[in-house]
Image (cartoon, helix red, strand yellow):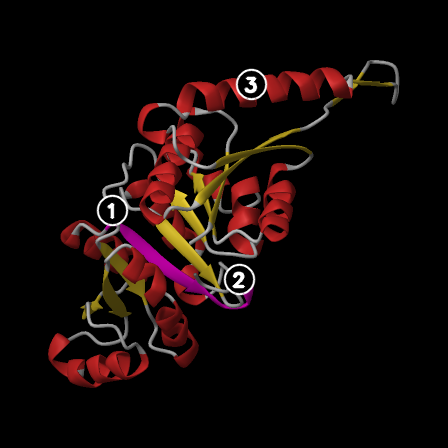
């Protein structure tokens, strides 16, 4: 991993994500790109359609000052030797994040979630939701208060399809970099009895597709994929959940908004979203 992009608005959750991204950068000797965006607001007076636009230079200089001050305060002590690039952009945050990710050819975007109270807004119609859905690289979402303690256990949610397992195979360099164990999780919502599930057949299929020594597989039966994933994450204390999305559509099948929200807000587990066309590590 060479470049990690971390957007920040200087909020507590964003700063928490910067800390997580910084730890990852130290572990992998990657460069950290810190992006802050600002918008030029337009105010409408009581007079019909008379606009008052803020002075661009004033807003730009104020944002630049905050970004520089943040770097000077945050990147000290153990983070002092990190390679950090500051980027300041005007415009819609999600658009600037995706543009920067493409231009800089970053390996991953690491960003904070906004917390439980904003859960309904996060994946549907928000800046973060647009990044998750359309980013040109994997996106790692960091819930509030989660600290980086390595990525020893990566839970890979699978539907056992060829493209899903092929993408898991592409994840191997990332897993090796962190000496991670890959835990494959298949949630069966159609079979009521565990005795009816051919676990050996599923295990053989995964091992045939993914050649990685530190792997294990689990089959959970549950009427709800959301409940099955959440229960598994709590029981096995995973360091991250990995979800593969087809056609950049986070809202189909296994990857419904309710499931992603549950992972991002109701558990303490980061969520790594990998898109169909992502080039992995």
Is 240 within the magenta? Answer: yes
Residue bearing mark 2: 249
Residue segment shown in magenta: 239-248
Residue that appears at 69% across and 34% down: 91
Q: Which residue is most to the front?
A: 81
- Measuring 46% from the left and 25% from the top, which residue is drawn there? 11
For the point 40% across and 80% down, the residue is 162
The residue that appears at 20% across and 54% down in the rendered structure is 231
Whole-number angstrom distance, CA of label 1 to CA of label 3: 30 Å
Q: Position of residue 255 (x, y in %)?
A: 42, 60
Q: Nearer the viewer, residue 54 or 75?
A: 75
Mark 1 residue element: loop
* Magenta run includes residue 221: no
Residue at the spot of label 3: 66
Quote the CA–CA distance across marks 2 and 3: 35 Å
- x, y percentage for residue 164? 40, 73
Q: Which mark, by number, is residue 150?
A: 1
Counting other residues with Cα less than 10 Å from the Cα at mark 1, is it few (<14), some (14-19), or many (20 or more)? some
Q: Are marks 1 and 3 in contact (CB under 8 Å)?
A: no
Disc 2 on helix, strand or loop? loop
Q: On screen, 81 above or below 263?
A: above
Give x and y (percent) for residue 279: 50, 65
Q: Quadrant of the N terminus?
A: bottom left
Q: Quadrant of residue 114?
A: top left
> In this rendering, would 61 be left or right of 133?
right
User: Main SS of the magenta segment?
Assistant: strand
């Amino acid at each position: 991993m060479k470049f990690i992009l971390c957007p920040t608005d200087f909020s507590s959750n964003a700063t928490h994500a910067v800390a997580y991204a910084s730890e990852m950068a130290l572990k992998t000797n990657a460069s950290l790109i810190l992006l802050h965006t600002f918008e030029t607001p337009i105010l409408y007076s009581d007079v019909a359609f008379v606009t008052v636009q803020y002075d661009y230079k004033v807003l730009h200089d104020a944002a630049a000052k905050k970004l520089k001050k943040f770097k000077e305060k945050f990147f000290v002590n153990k983070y002092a030797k990190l390679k950090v690039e500051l980027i300041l952009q005007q415009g819609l945050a999600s658009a600037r994040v995706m543009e920067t990710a493409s231009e800089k050819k970053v390996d991953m975007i690491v960003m904070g979630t906004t917390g439980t109270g904003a859960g309904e807004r996060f994946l549907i119609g928000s800046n973060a939701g647009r990044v998750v859905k359309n980013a040109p690289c994997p996106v790692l979402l960091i819930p509030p208060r989660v600290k980086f303690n390595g990525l020893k256990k990566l839970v890979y949610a699978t539907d056992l399809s060829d493209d899903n397992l092929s993408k898991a195979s592409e994840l191997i360099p990332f897993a090796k970099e962190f000496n991670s164990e890959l835990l494959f999780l298949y949630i069966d919502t159609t079979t009521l009895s565990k005795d009816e599930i051919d676990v050996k057949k599923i295990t053989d299929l995964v091992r045939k597709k993914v050649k990685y020594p530190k792997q294990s597989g689990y089959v959970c039966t549950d009427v709800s994929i959301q409940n099955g994933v959440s229960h598994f994450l709590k029981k096995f204390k995973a360091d991250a959940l990995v979800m593969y999305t087809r056609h950049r559509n986070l809202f189909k099948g296994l990857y419904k908004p309710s499931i992603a929200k549950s992972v991002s807000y109701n558990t303490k587990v980061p969520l790594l979203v990998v898109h169909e066309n992502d080039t992995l590590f």
